[in-house]
Image: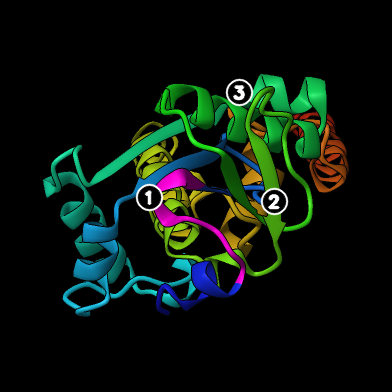
Amino acid sequence: MNSGWYIENNVQIENSIGIDEVGRGPLAGPVVAAAVWLSEKAVAILEKGDVSVRDSKKLSSRQRSQVVEWVKAQPKSILKYAVAEVSVEEIDSLNILNATLLAMKRAYTFLDFNVSIALIDGNKAPDLENTKTRTVIKGDDKVLAIALASIIAKEYRDDIMKNLSKKYPLYGWDKNVGYGSQQHIYAILQHGVTPHHRKTFSPMKDLASVSDGLKSLVAKMTSVS
């Protein structure tokens, strides 16, 4: 990845920010978004390749951690970022698309930095009032600020799920971070849903129904014996 995209698309690096989200697909946990502003100096440093910046899904956990540590070490004069989350309750109330757009808008608001344009990963953009938006398909592979936002949001959300796993160890959130792994699904069937599960997601409705049925069957068999 390099800064060529900005030049080719007539976007001034220092007059734009990148926004990305993570956590649309999991069965549990919040959706998280990050907004990032980069200076020309920060881009020049990144292009030296000291840290690997690209789509967070293409990096190992160790590589993502290294990037986040690098980000935190930079002065705000050359790099700014903000992270926002939308809770499970809000996801169930709004639906996942609107919750995702809300997370992006919150990250933009928390960044509190005036630019002319916000570059959004994907094909849907939130309403950012006085700031123009431009969607960039596979933006986390093309735009440095979006790639950084992807990594920051991913690490932030993973940390949330790993911490929740200490209270709910049976669901394996320290490894699956809320996605529908075999361990996670089996745990839902055996132990039911937690307050951190997205109850409006279709798989969750089905799993919860089966779980309730199994519990009822076990209760009947126990009472008979």
Q: Tell me if residue 106 comes above or below residue 40 in the rendering.
A: above
SS at mark 1? helix
For disc 3, the marked residue is 195
Amino acid at circle 2: Arg
Q: In which quarter of the image is residue 94?
A: top right
Tag 3 and tag 1, C-beta contact below 8 Å: no
In the rendered view of the protein, which quadrant contains the C terminus? top right
How many C-alpha atoms fall within 10 Å of the one at disc 3: few (<14), some, or many (≥20)?
few
Query: Which mark's residue is nearer the viewer, 3 or 2?
Result: 2
Q: Name the residue under label 2.
A: 134
Q: Which residue sits at x=50%, y=66%?
A: 143
Q: Where is residue 79 in the image (x, y as percent from the top left)?
A: 26, 45
Name the amino acid, label 1: Ile
Which one is in front, 69 or 120?
120
Spatial CA span between label 3 and label 1: 25 Å
Residue 177 seen from this side: yes
Of label 3 and label 1, which has the lower sequence position? 1
**Residue 181 higher or lower than 125, as above or below:** below
Q: Earlier in the sequence, mark 2 or mark 1?
A: 2
* Residue corresponding to mark 1: 152
- Dot 1, how many residues are within 10 Å of its Cα: few (below 14), some (14-19), or many (20+)? many
Helix or strand or loop: what does disc 2 sit on? strand
